Image (cartoon, rainbow, N blue to C red):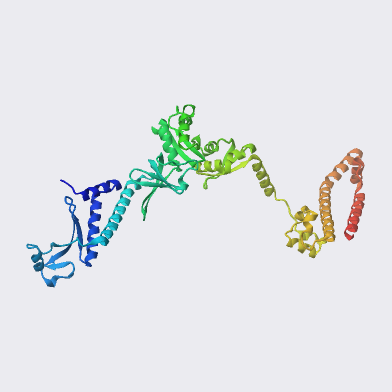
Amino acid sequence: MATSALYQSIELLSQEKGINPAIVVSAVEEAIALATRKYYKTQENMRGELNRETGEISAYIYKTVVAAEDQIEDPVNQITLEEANDLAPGVEVGSEIRIYRDTTPLGRIAAQLAKQIIFQKVREAERDTVFQEYAHREKEVLNATVKRVEGQDVIFDLGKAEARCPRREQSRLEQFTVGERLRVVLLKVDRAAKGPQVIVSRAAPELVQNLFQSEVPEIYDNTVVIRAIAREAGERTKIAVQSRDKDVDPVGACVGMKGMRVQSIIRELRGEKIDIIEYSDEITTFAEKALQPAKVSRVSITDLGEKQLEVIVDDTQLSLAIGKKGQNVRLAAKLLGWKIDIKSEEEKRQEVEQQMQALAGSPTTPIEQVTELGDGIIQKLVAAGVTTVESLADMTPEQLEEIPGIGEKTLEKISVAVRHYFGQFEEAEAAAAAAADAPAGETAAAETAEAATGEEKPEGAGAEAAVEATGEEAPAADATAQEETEQQAAKEDGA
């Protein structure tokens, strides 16, 4: 059956857009019907009709036939049986009758309207076709050709549709040439108002996985399995592989003879670095391998629920383990799916020391205990955040002078008061220690004297023997020395 030139044009358009010719024919018929109704300024139901053989387009209104006039509910779209028989003899109640309208006087405006409607319908059909073709293929790797570059975006030709690759989905190492064939990952299909938007990526980890499947037969036949991939496109990729055959080395299979397999993938990715790591079910072992090329001293799980690891490395390995701008540890954490806190041996040692000090609890004394300072000075110090005697003692004269209201005389008074306080504190500690040791010493000396003479000694004899044996001064002399020290300190405070 011969077809008209118009219908042949419709078929060509359908092939180009990848849509069914019936959709275009329907769009043409609907367009001519709307244009005709607008021309005749009627609200009657109207349809268009395309003759496939002649290419003639006609338009007609249609009305439903009812038995009598009293049954008409919609005069615009209904007609009585009597009137219908005048137009088309033999028509029956309930059927539709066509009344054709002349389309020759439609003119340019109606043709322009019909054109817009046809284009709109074709775009909608194209959008639906593309969506149905690609919507279920997300994360699939497709072969594409670079069609053009629009600003920072690259437009790829997928064969049945165009795809857009935004700047964020491109590798910084790549420069695209029109006509170049590449593999891309289908991210999503967006039903945008301007038409179907297919978004593809050259930065997705699935691209690396597909390349390894193509280059490594052991991965293709599932002898070696890719367990995880972490990628920063254009920089570095870490891929964890595991062998299902104990005789097959998963890392060696991916690297290939003299690195030929992995080098082929690196060339496809424009020189992106690739770390191939053997997967381990033991998370600490896996973490050590994931942080390569850095050498890890030890790995410990700090929080199993939150999936947090603490990694300790040698001081010389810290920068290598962290990587440039934290890239190595960031990729390792992404590969593991765990948070990684990485520390050097020195940092860990300091942390342990601080924890021990915190557990020991260094005593602190409120500054109000130093009564010699006076209420005025104490208020000024507390206002400046100095609340303990220890923190006051640690401050330099320059730091103290920065506090409002603290001058040279006040500074000297603070210095004397602090020295006096700590002097009293040390004397009290020494006296307590001497008191704790004295009974044992006296008893031992007395027992020695009794054993030598066989007689009981009067009170104080033990102390005298102890003095003679040790050559130390008597307690009375100690008391005198202590009084002199206190008097000297009092004179200094008065000054």
User: Residue 494, percent across and down?
Assistant: 89, 60
Asked if residue 91 lies left or right of residue 483, the reply is left
Asked if residue 200 lies left or right of residue 386, the reply is left
Q: Quadrant of the image for the C terminus?
A: bottom right
User: Residue 249, percent across and down?
Assistant: 47, 29
Q: Quadrant of the image for the N terminus?
A: top left
Please name whichever residue, 142 or 1, is drawn nearer the observer in this view of the structure.
1
Asked if residue 58 lies left or right of residue 376, the reply is left
Can the viewer see residue 205 in this picture? yes
Please name whichever residue, 261 or 18, is drawn nearer the observer in this view of the structure.
18
User: Residue 115, percent across and down?
Assistant: 28, 57
- Residue at left offset 8%, top offset 65%: 85
- Residue at left offset 49%, top offset 29%: 259
Can the viewer see residue 457 in this picture? no
Please name whichever residue, 378 or 59, is drawn nearer the observer in this view of the structure.
59
User: Residue 294, percent across and down?
Assistant: 58, 36
Instruction: Return the residue found at the far bottom.
Output: 70
The vertical placement of 247 against 427, above or below, is: above
Please name whichever residue, 300 or 142, is drawn nearer the observer in this view of the structure.
142
